[in-house]
Amino acid sequence: MKVLLLLASLISLSVAVSAQADGSYVYKPKDPALYDTIAHMDSVYFNAYNSCDMATQAAIYSDSIEFYHDGGGLERSKAHLLQALKDNICGKVTRVFVKGSLEVYPIPGFGAVEIGLHRFINHQENDSESKPDRFICVWRHLNGQWQIYRVISLHMGN
């Protein structure tokens, strides 16, 4: 719960700071190197997701993962999450990142928060493509490794 409250505070603070005089919002990373690192890790993870590389997905998810899904609820079991991905995603769904939507915020002494948009292509339904959905990942940097610690997956009216 503390992580979610911190996340909400970070988002609202950064939006307030980045709001332009005309009311528009322009994101600029506070730490460009961290931004590049998390963008790379997102790519590594979702290449594994799209190719059903379960070993890479398992390595990237923290053993203490919490995956919040606005349709499926909360999953705290890494084994159950990986099995659900294998059963429901592998060969059936492809994730497509929405270019220009990535935001990365540092969490000092812990890692980073990644916020972005992505779409999904459902190969079981004539390659239908979803509207963009928002995702939030909390990345933990521990012992030189980046792992996905928390995920919030939001489907915006599909």
Image (tube, helix red, strand yellow):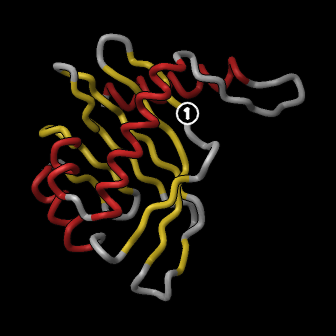
Left or right, 129 with respect to 16, comes to left
Residue 155: give x, y in percent of width and height: 50, 60
Q: Nearer the viewer, residue 76 or 58?
A: 58
Query: In this rendering, is residue 9 above or below 96?
Result: above
Left or right, 55 with respect to 32, comes to left
Per the image, the residue denoted by label 1 is: 103
What residue appears at the point 23 percent right and 41 percent down from the top-left corner?
60
On the image, which quarter does residue 94 sit in? bottom left
Q: Which quarter of the rendering shows the C terminus?
A: bottom right
Query: In this rendering, is residue 23 above or below 31?
Result: below
What residue appears at the point 51 percent right and 22 percent down from the top-left corner?
10
Q: Which quarter of the rendering shows the N terminus?
A: top left
Q: Farthest residue in the top direction? A: 109
On the image, which quarter does residue 16 sit in? top right
What residue appears at the point 41 percent right and 28 percent down from the top-left corner?
37
What residue appears at the point 59 percent right and 52 percent down from the top-left corner?
98
Residue 28: give x, y in percent of width and height: 65, 24
Badge 1 amino acid:
Glu
Left or right, 55 with respect to 34, comes to left
Residue 68: give x, y in percent of width and height: 33, 50
The count of marks equals 1
Query: Could you classify mark 1 by the number of other residues whose Cα lies within 10 Å: few (under 14), some (14-19), or many (20 or more)?
Result: some
Residue 147: give x, y in percent of width and height: 25, 34
